[in-house]
Amino acid sequence: MAYQYLTLRKEGGIAYVTLNRPEKMNALSYELIREIISVQEQLKRDKSLRVVIVNGAEGNLSSGFDTKSMVDNPLNLAKIGVKWFPTKANVAQLISMGWQRLPIPVIAVIEGVCFGAAMDIVLGADMRYAADNAQLSIMEIKWGLMPDMGGFDSLRTLVTKDTALELLYTGDIIKAKQAREINLVSRVCKDPMQDAKAMAEKIINGSPDAIAAIKLSVHKSWSASTSILLARETLYQVALIISKNRSVAVRRNKKSGEKYFERQWWW
């Protein structure tokens, strides 16, 4: 499928999704938001993929919501915000939640600006690798609004409550180093894309069934009760023990001389 406002490249089990409106600093128009949802669905169906890396074209992740494009066409704003059931995600919220629902890890590469709605994209990723020059802001307060695109679901697990409130109340722009200090990003890197690729190569060596189970379990159990967590761990582990990919992973690690994985399995 061809996309107009983003690019999708697949190589060696890694999908590279690049927001591609550089003339607008990759601002999120209605059309780009729809393409993000579409590419998420495409990636979910592709069984050959093991990792997704998301970034922005030409040195910026995204300047956030393209307010002008929405004001010029209020119907588009309604299309991404409407939902029939309050507990379900609307189109706007899927730009964050959609990455969480993929059965493979998602790494966000943050360069330049990452403002407003762009924060929802990176908060939906499993890891966030930021360049030294990156600037981040949860900026909705500057428009008299509150964040409503799903990113808070991850934000509440990353930073402390008072830190989250500082970010939400002020809309302050913070640099990558400060974002790392408060755990908003996973790493600050000289070359975040290179670090993301290196991490992706490590992940690819694991069993895809185990990776999917780990991701699903962590997302569902992070704030769950201990009893639910224990039950989910047991169910997922039983499924993994009988899966074909577990034996493949054991043979691969044994062949490479890494005995640790095989021994630890039986603890």
Image: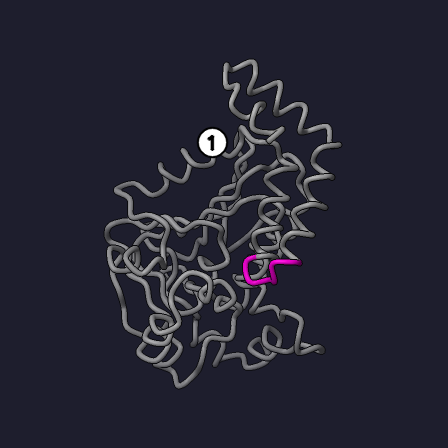
Residue at 25% from the left image edge and 60% from the top image edge: 178
Image quadrant in which you'd find residue 21? bottom left
Indicate left or right for 124 with 249 as reference. left
* Along the line of sight, the residue nearer the viewer: 227 or 173: 227
Within the magenta stretch, is there residue 36? no
Residue at disc 1, secondary structure: helix
Within the magenta stretch, is there residue 223? yes
Residue at 73% from the left image edge and 39% from the top image edge: 238
- For the image, the number of numbered tags is 1
Residue at image mark 1: 202
Q: Where does residue 251 sit, x and y in percent of width and height?
A: 62, 18
Q: Is residue 219 above or below residue 119?
A: above
Farthest residue toward the bottom? 144
Q: Is residue 225 above or below residue 7?
A: below
* Label 1 crowd (10 A; few <14 / some 14-19 / many >=20): few
Q: Where does residue 267 sit, x and y in percent of width and height?
A: 59, 31
Q: Main secondary structure of the magenta part?
A: loop
Indicate left or right for 77 with 192 as reference. right
Q: Where does residue 229 sit, x and y in percent of width and height?
A: 63, 55
Indicate left or right for 239 with 77 as reference. right
What's the amino acid at mark 1?
Lys
* Along the line of sight, the residue nearer the viewer: 253 or 134: 253
Span of residues in magenta: 222-227
Q: How is the image coloured?
A: one colour
